[in-house]
Image (cartoon, rainbow, N blue to C red):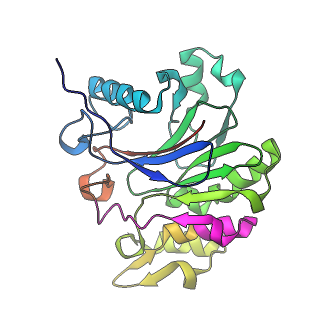
Amino acid sequence: MEKTINPKLQYYPLGDGMTAFSTMRQGGYSKDNYGEFNINCYCGDDKEAIRKNREALCGLLAIDDDHLLMPHQVHLTKIAQIDNTFLSLTADERHQALEGVDALMTNVEGVCIGVSTADCIPVLLYDPVHRAVCAIHAGWRGTVKRITEQAVEQMTYVYGSRPADIMAQIGPGIHLDSFEVGNEVYEDFANEGFDMQAISKRKKKWHIDLPECNRLQLVSTGIPADQIAVSQVCTFQQSGDFFSARRLGINSGRIFTAVILL
């Protein structure tokens, strides 16, 4: 009999009636730079290991596999709404609908929506009043394009969410001291009007604080600062527990940061 393996999750206390988490590297079936827990099918991992990892996570969450959703991210700002119409699509139609998407939102219970990262910044939003959630992938390109701001605006438009009610969690990602960038990346942020004194510092090269960039975006939408939690995990520094593409290379596993309404 094969040994039962349970994925190790880092949970976030965003509120009642939901579960929010990030997967860690332990507790899965993947090997080498994908080891142990990876469910991203776009990074070169073994398909059978991914299947078994998904099965283990679904078992932990008590959901069917078709209710565990992750888009194929492309570092842009497309946000997909997961509703009953989406859930009625065929597998191929769902796959197409999630292509080129970098954030998911839903108000349907029992559907786990999440994003995949390995140094980029995952952001989770929860509106306990209107019972709606959102998972955002904010790499540096998405951050420059203000995807986190746009996601709050979309929740306001679709669900009637008020920023004053939203609880937010910024998940594990690369932090200021480890995120060294070229002058062109620094200029991209400066040209988009970011407060460079607040989000950057110069060492031998420029460093950008991606978690702070996204925290400031959340604050700018009207979410109270004390309703925004920021993970202290730097994926680059803690790559033994969380995947880091800068440490392990792009052919490596990914963190899954997700939320499910109960």
Q: Is residue 188 above or below residue 28?
A: below
Horizontal and vertical percent for residue 91?
54, 17
Quarter of the view holding residue 51: top left
Q: Which quarter of the image is occupied by the N terminus? A: top left
Q: Which quarter of the image is occupied by the C terminus? A: top right
Q: Is residue 82 above or below residue 89?
A: below
| Residue 102 visible, this angle | no
| Residue 72 visible, this angle | yes
Horizontal and vertical percent for residue 172?
42, 59
Left or right: residue 203 compared with residue 67: left
Observer-nearest residue: 48 or 203?
A: 48
Observer-nearest residue: 212 or 11?
A: 11
- Residue at image x 61%, y 28%? 97
Residue 75 inside the magenta-drawn segment: no
Horizontal and vertical percent for residue 238?
29, 62
Left or right: residue 32 compared with residue 227: left
Q: Is residue 52 above or below residue 71?
A: above
User: Furthest residue to the top?
Assistant: 90
Horizontal and vertical percent for residue 109?
64, 32
Q: Is residue 88 above or below residue 75?
A: above
Quarter of the view holding residue 235: bottom left
Observer-nearest residue: 141 or 115?
A: 115
- What is the total number of numbered labels drawn onto the structure image? 0
- The segment highlighted magenta reads 215-238
- Residue at image x 52%, y 32%? 69
- Residue at image x 63%, y 46%? 134
Residue 216 inside the magenta-drawn segment: yes
User: Furthest residue to the front?
Assistant: 16
